[in-house]
Amino acid sequence: MAGQSPAAPAAEPPAHKPYVSAETVMPEFTWSAVLVGAILGIVFGMSSLYLVLKVGMTVSASIPIAVLSITLFRVFSPLFGRNATILENNIVQTTGSAGESIAFGVGVTVPVLLMWGYGLEYMRVALVAVLGGLLGILMMIPLRRAFIVKQHGKLIYPEGTACADVLIVGEKGGTSAVKVFVGFTLAFVYYFLNVGLKLWKDIPEWPLWKQIGDKAVGFKGAVLSGEIAPHLLGVGYVIGTRISCIMVGGGVVAALVLTPAIVFFGQGLSAPLFPGLKLIRDMTPDEIRQAYVLYIGAGAVATGGIISMLRAMPMIVSSVRSGLRDLAVRGANQTGAAGASPSRAVPRTERDLSMKVVLLGSLAIVVAILAAQSTFHMNIVGALCIVVFGFLFVTVSSRLTGEIGSSSNPISGMTVATLLMTCLIFLVLGWTTAEHKLTALSIAAIVCIAASNGGTTSQDLKTGFLVGGTPRAMQLAILVGALTSALVIGVTLLWLNEGATVYSNKDLPAVTLPLKGNEPKESVRGPHAKDDTDKYYAVRVRVGDVAGVPAGKYLVDQAGQIHYLVDPGVSGKLRKQDDGTPVTKYAAPQTALMSFIIDGILSRQMPWSLVLLGVAIALALELAGIPALPFAVGVYLPLSASSPIFIGGGVRWIVDKWLRRGQPESEMSPGVLLSSGLIAGGTIAGVVAALLGLNERMAKAMVNTGPAWLRAHADSDGFAMLPFALLAVFLILVGGEKLLRSKPAA
């Protein structure tokens, strides 16, 4: 009825009231907040990159950064003359959170170049990280009102809401970073003593068979192993018991089923079985894994990623549809509001960056991508793919993080979808050369980073919406954080790869490689450098280029004879230098997935029987109601990587049973905070050890420290388990609130 129409607005839900009102003015976007946020973002970005290269996953950094920010400003308040405001702490976590999401995107895509035999160039890595990170943020900004404001109460944004709770508790005098600092310090010292100074073995192994003469007694080919790293223990605790059990299940199938089966059925063969280059009976379990099991794991990972994408497809379609509809409504409302009351002031909590900045910034990024022809090998079709797929998956990522959280956001599935659609477009157009592969990879890398950072940005903006932050200040802060983190993540990736690269002259293919005449010259590094000072031509062999020669980088003489294989640190196969010195490698499971998809579609050169075995395993798991993706990652990773994650999940189960929790632990629980410190400390120690290892004299001194100090104990499998067991017990006691108890807030 017409007379009752004025009462209609009363049916609307009450307006949201942030913790800090729109009328309140307090310090927010200050140099100290941005600087601390950028530094913490760099630290957690390096940590996340190390983790994603190791096990293919990261954990959210926003809450540890918020806790650290509150404590740091509280401790150093005399230096600044005051304590930080809640809005400054919010700027710190917003600036710092970009590092983790960019690290994930870089870690799952860029190292594909190494698998194809290319080198890693800093400018290429930095450009991908910077442009993808900035594009994701800019594309998310127009969606803020649609998802954060209009959908408040419907889209929860779990990490963003939890982070707001941390900031509010900290403002009231609670929240201490003691557990994060203790975890960081313990893990850093532990892991540096372990992988840096080699005081104890980092990967204890127990073969389940013994070779007596020509006869194998026991379970031939089966090996139990564990990388006893504090950050993997922390990851297992954070992701929980169920997922960690599923992951180690995949590792058990790979190490105790597939590898022994290949040994059993293949040990009688008189010729190498494709794609292997040696007789199976002459292979070690690790060589069997590299030659056969990895392809099975890659097929399972690809299938798991695609299934997760298909499962999310209804939400993806709904997200795109509602996002576009809300944007259209917002545009119409703004037009109407501009005509009705042009003088109306916009409240502080509703001020976004101008749409002109968003559009011009996005256009500038696309132009920069096209201009970097030598880096991205980009064309207009590729640029259109980046714009279309970028906006599509930034929208999807931003909405899905609101429903299921960042940790469950299927960024890998979105990247797989981008690669599949891009490669199919290229296949139809007949673009299947090596340059077109680089173009497809560049598209996937930029879209992956943009989607990942778009989800992170939406979580940050949700936190700001709840605490009363200024959107424009937060958007500027995360742009700064993305830029600083991206520049350092590129250097970190090069450090990690270079520190674990092996120059080997063992078991080289007896093939002469053709030279084009423009190959650069390089000297050998590592243990061979002191005896071999010659310079060689660096030849990169891609998949299928030369029969009998695996893809990779080789050093050859002027006649094309191979003298050294340059095995990269990331996705490489050799775990020891030729003199026996152990090397810490990075399996990068998600990276291999991207490589297999591009090669499988554009090159059509793949051991498809092995890949389809992995597909069948993933389908069987899904039919049994078990998530295929974490299991598939366990198949692809060595058992040594998933077993400590399983132990961390077991510790979480013990703590939950001990405290009889009916609900999952919160992001601020003692065990989760300590685990966050373990993850950061262990991974940063790994980065520092890799950096120091670039100096050959330093590397030699570090490697010899353990045997000199502890003699036989330094190489003992049993002794290595002792410090790890003590660390696990400490995590149980802290998680069970028997040690490092927090004092209640006043």
Image (tube, rainbow, N blue to C red):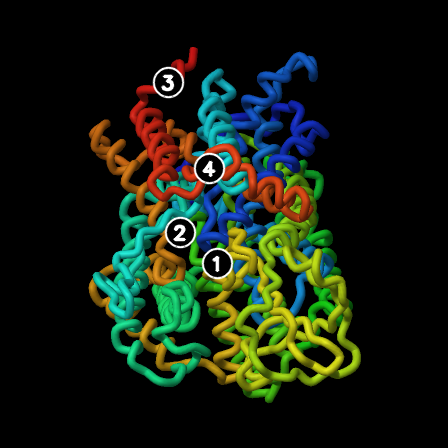
Q: Are marks 2 and 4 in contact (CB under 8 Å)?
A: no
- Residue of label 3: 741
Q: Are marks 3 and 4 in contact (CB under 8 Å)?
A: no
What residue do we see at 21% from left, 32% from top?
657
- Residue of label 2: 641
Image quadrant in which you'd find residue 474: top right
Label 3 to label 1: alpha-carbon separation: 37 Å
Counting residues from the N terminus, which is met first, the one under dot 2 or under dot 4? 2
Q: Does the rendering let one see residue 428?
A: yes
Residue type at mark 4 is Arg
Residue type at mark 2 is Ala
Residue 198 is left or right of residue 741, and the answer is right
Return the residue nearer the eye: 272 or 248: 272
Name the mark on residue 711. 4
Vertical placement of 338 versus 94: above or below? below
Counting residues from the N terminus, which is met first, the one under dot 3 or under dot 4? 4
Q: Does the rendering let one see residue 156?
A: no
The secondary structure type at the circle numbered 4 is helix
- Residue of label 1: 587
The secondary structure type at the circle numbered 2 is helix
Return the residue nearer the eye: 465 or 459: 459
Location of the C terminus (image quadrant) = top left
Label 2 to label 4: alpha-carbon separation: 26 Å
Counting residues from the N terminus, which is met first, the one under dot 4 or under dot 1? 1
